[in-house]
């Protein structure tokens, strides 16, 4: 008999709530756009949406909750430490949900969580060393090394989005200029498109990365050039990281990964230029198969890993 998990994926522009079984099967998902991103809004909206979904499935009550957050997380204490674009800091979201629902809660950074999902349900079930990068409203990453999810000395390993790719580039809220996140995440794609001569508005509304991808698929030269630049920025950073970590595989997830075909050639060409090829002879680059549900699978994987003490989660629990 399957157990169920309440999976909560908190993003920069939206949040998703789902009921997921321990085999990775989704019972139901609800999608919500943020009207504002504040502590009060996050807690009130995610709790209310969770209760609404659970009321519809009283025969499938969850045994635990998994939460993914954008930015820095402290999984051991269940704290959302920091999110540079939102201003949220030191939010004890794990304890809040545990007190609200009375079941164990496990949280993690969204990229770390999605790497766990790739390991449990996705492309890396049989891969011990891999790199995961998520490209959406922001950019994050995670590292699996020798079948262990690597957290680093301070719990913040994998912050790929804050590798500098353009000296004196766009200022980032982290305090640096030219971070990959500012030049290759969704808003960065828009900035690049406009700087190359593209129109900020499309069909009367501000254009976004998805809209630029649609233009590129129709052959718009500026949009195509924008995604060529996207592949260059991502490829340059991934090559450097691969030279250091020597992974078997790189998995690219997040909303922008749905446009992977538009920047795959540029990324491959850039990596071919910067990668130490004889040291990384069989490196595989592929997009995640989870699509927009990556964060949901990630949240479920966080709870499963926490409950079962998998992949160095032995001490990361609020139980």
Image (tube, rainbow, N blue to C red):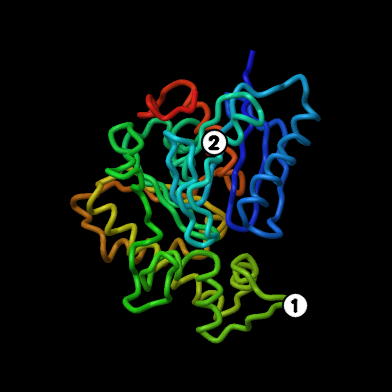
Residue where numbered disc 2 is placed: 94
Q: Secondary structure at mark 2?
A: helix
Please indicate whether residue 187 sits to the left or right of residue 143 in the image. right
Q: Position of residue 80 (x, y in %)?
A: 49, 45
Residue contact between numbered discs 1 and 2, judged by CB atoms under 8 Å: no
| Circle 1 residues within 10 Å: few <14, some 14–19, many ≥20 | few
The residue depicted at 59 percent of the width and 36 percent of the height is 96
Write the residue at 68% across / 75% down: 206
Mark seen at residue 158: none
Report how many numbered discs are placed on residues in the image: 2
**Which residue is outermost to the top?**
1
Q: Is residue 253 above or below residue 138?
A: above
Residue 191 vs 237, above or below: the answer is below
Q: Which of the two residues, 167 or 288, is positioned nearer the viewer here?
A: 167
**Helix, strand or loop at mark 1:** loop
Q: Is residue 152 visible?
A: yes
66 to the left or right of 207? left
- Whether residue 230 is visible here, answered yes or no, is no
Nearest the eye: 184 or 315: 315
**Mark 2 residue crowding within 10 angstroms, few (<14) / some (14–19) / many (20+):** many
Residue corresponding to mark 1 = 203
Mark in front: 1 vs 2: 2
Sequence-wise, the earlier of marks 1 and 2 is 2
Is residue 46 shown left or right of residue 198? right
Give whichever of 278, 5 is nearer the camera.
Answer: 5
Query: Where residue 28 sits: x, y (%)?
Result: 72, 35
Q: Tell me where residue 41 appears, x and y as whole percent.
A: 67, 52
């Amino acid at each position: 008999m399957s157990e169920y998990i309440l999976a909560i994926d908190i993003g920069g522009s939206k949040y998703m709530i789902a009921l997921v079984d321990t085999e990775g099967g989704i019972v139901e998902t609800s999608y919500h756009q943020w009207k504002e991103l504040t502590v009060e809004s996050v807690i009130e909206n995610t709790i209310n949406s969770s209760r609404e979904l659970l009321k519809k499935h009283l025969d499938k009550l969850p045994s635990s909750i998994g939460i993914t957050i954008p930015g820095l997380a402290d999984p051991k204490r269940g704290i959302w430490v920091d999110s540079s674009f939102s201003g949220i800091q030191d939010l004890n979201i794990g304890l809040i949900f545990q007190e609200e629902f009375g079941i164990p809660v496990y949280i993690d950074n969204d990229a770390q969580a999605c790497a766990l999902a790739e390991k449990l349900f996705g492309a890396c079930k049989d891969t011990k060393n891999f790199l995961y990068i998520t490209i959406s409203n922001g950019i994050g990453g995670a590292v699996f090394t020798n079948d262990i999810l690597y957290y680093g000395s301070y719990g913040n390993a994998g912050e790929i989005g804050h590798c500098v790719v353009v000296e004196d580039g766009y200022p980032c809220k982290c305090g640096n200029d030219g971070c990959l996140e500012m030049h290759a995440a969704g808003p960065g794609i828009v900035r690049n498109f406009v700087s190359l001569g593209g129109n900020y508005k499309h069909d009367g509304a501000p254009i976004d990365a998805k809209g630029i991808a649609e233009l590129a698929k129709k052959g718009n030269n500026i949009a195509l050039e924008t995604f060529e630049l996207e592949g260059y920025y991502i490829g340059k950073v991934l090559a450097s990281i691969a030279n250091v970590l020597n992974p078997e595989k790189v998995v690219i997830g997040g909303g922008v990964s749905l446009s992977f075909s538009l920047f795959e050639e540029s990324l491959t060409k850039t990596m071919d230029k910067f990668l130490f090829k004889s040291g990384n002879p069989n490196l595989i680059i592929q997009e995640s198969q989870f699509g927009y549900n990556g964060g949901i699978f990630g949240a479920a994987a966080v709870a499963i890993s926490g409950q079962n003490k998998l992949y160095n989660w032995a001490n990361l629990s609020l139980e």
